[in-house]
Amino acid sequence: MAANNRSDHGSDENTRLYNPYQNYEVPINKSQYLYKLPTSPEFLFTEESLRQRRSWGENLTFYTGTAYLGGSVAGASVGVITGVKSFESGDTTKLKINRILNSSGQTGRTWGNRIGIIGLVYAGIESGVVAATDRDDVWTSVVAGLGTGAVCRAARGVRSAAVAGALGGLAAGAVVAGKQIVKRYVPI
């Protein structure tokens, strides 16, 4: 809420005044855009503020979106190569471009959907494990990878689900370990 008059500014001890334009040289009446922000913490309990993790909805959106985008880019790259390989000797430039665009669009869409679903399943299992165990560590990601691999290959049989689960757990563990190594040794 914006405070429009000066007499109202110091009336409440639980708020602080904030001017979003204070660091910019803009010709704006700065007293008109003072906002009262609460000084109380965002969390009700201090234990909640110590946890540095995303909510299940943010987790779901992040993993699904990232997987879809990565799958689409990878699929489009493979589609460009497939489109170039499908050239024929009498093709015009317009027809070659059309082949590349059609192939990259089809393959990119297919790969994006498939890998996006894997991200969706992974995010759901990881959020479920975090909710059940109230821990967010390396083993949570490994269990989510195991579950994702097993669920995605369950229709092909128990053996295929077990192998895919093991590979999914190894992949998730490797990604988390790589993330920890990058955090530790790469100055960002």
Image (spheres, rainbow, N blue to C red):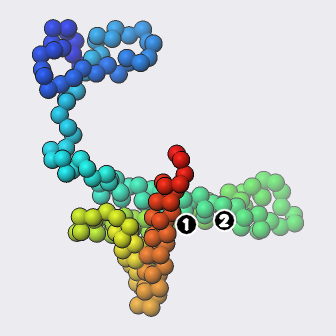
Q: Nearer the viewer, residue 97 or 173?
A: 173
- Residue 116 visible? The answer is no
Q: Residue at x 47, y 75 (%)?
A: 170
Rendered position, 14 above or below 103: above
Residue 114 horizontal/vertical position (percent): 49, 69
Q: As shown in the figure, which amino acid type bears the numbered disc 1?
A: Trp
Q: Residue at x 54, y 62 (%)?
A: 71
Q: Nearer the viewer, residue 80 or 18?
A: 18
Q: Residue at label 2? A: 78
Location of residue 7 (image quadrant): top left
Task: Answer with left or right where residue 11 lies relative to residue 65.
Answer: left
Mark 2–mark 1 CB contact (< 8 Å): yes
Q: Which mark is residue 10?
A: none
Q: As shown in the figure, which amino acid type bears the numbered disc 2?
A: Val
Q: CA distance from mark 2 to mark 1?
A: 10 Å
Location of residue 173 (image quadrant): bottom left
Residue extending farthest right: 89
Residue 171 horizontal/vertical position (percent): 49, 72
Residue 26 horizontal/vertical position (percent): 44, 12
Quarter holding the N terminus is: top left
Q: Residue at x 76, y 68 (%)?
A: 86
Task: Answer with left or right where residue 121 lies relative to residue 114.
Answer: left
Residue 151 horizontal/vertical position (percent): 39, 78
